[in-house]
Amino acid sequence: MTTQGIEPRKLRRLADGLTVGRALLGLPLILALASNQLALGWWLLLLGGLSDWADGVLARRAGGGSTWGARLDPLTDKILIAAPLLWIGAVGLLPLWAIWLLLARELLISGWRSGATGGGPASRGGKAKTILQFGSLLLLLWPWSGAGWAQLMGWWLFWPSLLLALSSAWGYLRKADQP
């Protein structure tokens, strides 16, 4: 991704635009899954994951993202993750208690981050958790032939992502307890 010569303000605006676009993907994603259009849902989730990566690259190249983007980015990730998780729970690919635990963690940490200065930057564990979640969900939603192996791999990848989610939440909350 070449962004040399583009002023930082324009890079931040572009990163923020990708973040808003990712937030808007949640509704078509859940609608595609609910209407059994798994291939469309898979592509929307992939597009959302790639836009998450791209807006991070743009923000770093701008010398840092906007405060608004720092607060909105983690929330859009939650929207994009929650949509397929709700469908996955509804069709029984993962146990509901595990999905509930993950979504409860996401709401708790989103609440903490919204009150933190600068949106509470993501930890390494939080970033790794997001990558594992996207990978797990893409495999669980695999719509093409041979979906059994992909769903099995996605199922196994979900559990380390859940453990990372809980351990990174613990790290965020320990930080919140310190002055």
Image (cartoon, rainbow, N blue to C red):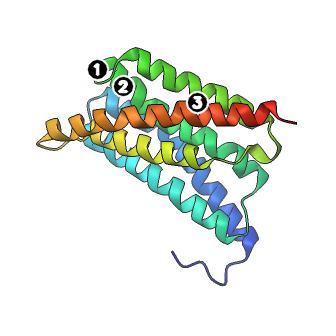
Percent from the top left, x then y, of residue 85?
41, 28
Tag 3's secondary structure?
helix
Most extreme residue toward the right is 179
Task: Please name the residue shown 78% across and 33% down the image.
Answer: 176
Against 116, residue 99 (above or below) is above
To which residue does mark 1 refer? 91
Amino acid on which disc 2 is placed: Trp
Q: Position of residue 68 (x, y in %)?
A: 75, 49
Which residue is at the front of the view, 2 or 107?
107
Q: What crowding class fits label 3: few (fewer than 14 Cα within 10 Å), some (14-19), or many (20 or more)?
A: many
Which residue is under mark 2?
A: 87
**Closer to us: 164 or 147:** 164
The quarter of the image holding the C terminus is top right
Does residue 166 sit above or below 15 in this rendering? above
| Residue 63 falls in image quadrant | bottom right
> What SS does tag 2 mark?
helix
Residue for point 60% across, 78% down: 3
Marks 1 and 3 close (CB-CB < 8 Å)? no
Disc 3 residue type (three-letter): Glu
Q: Are marks 2 and 1 in contact (CB under 8 Å)?
A: yes
Amino acid beneath label 1: Val
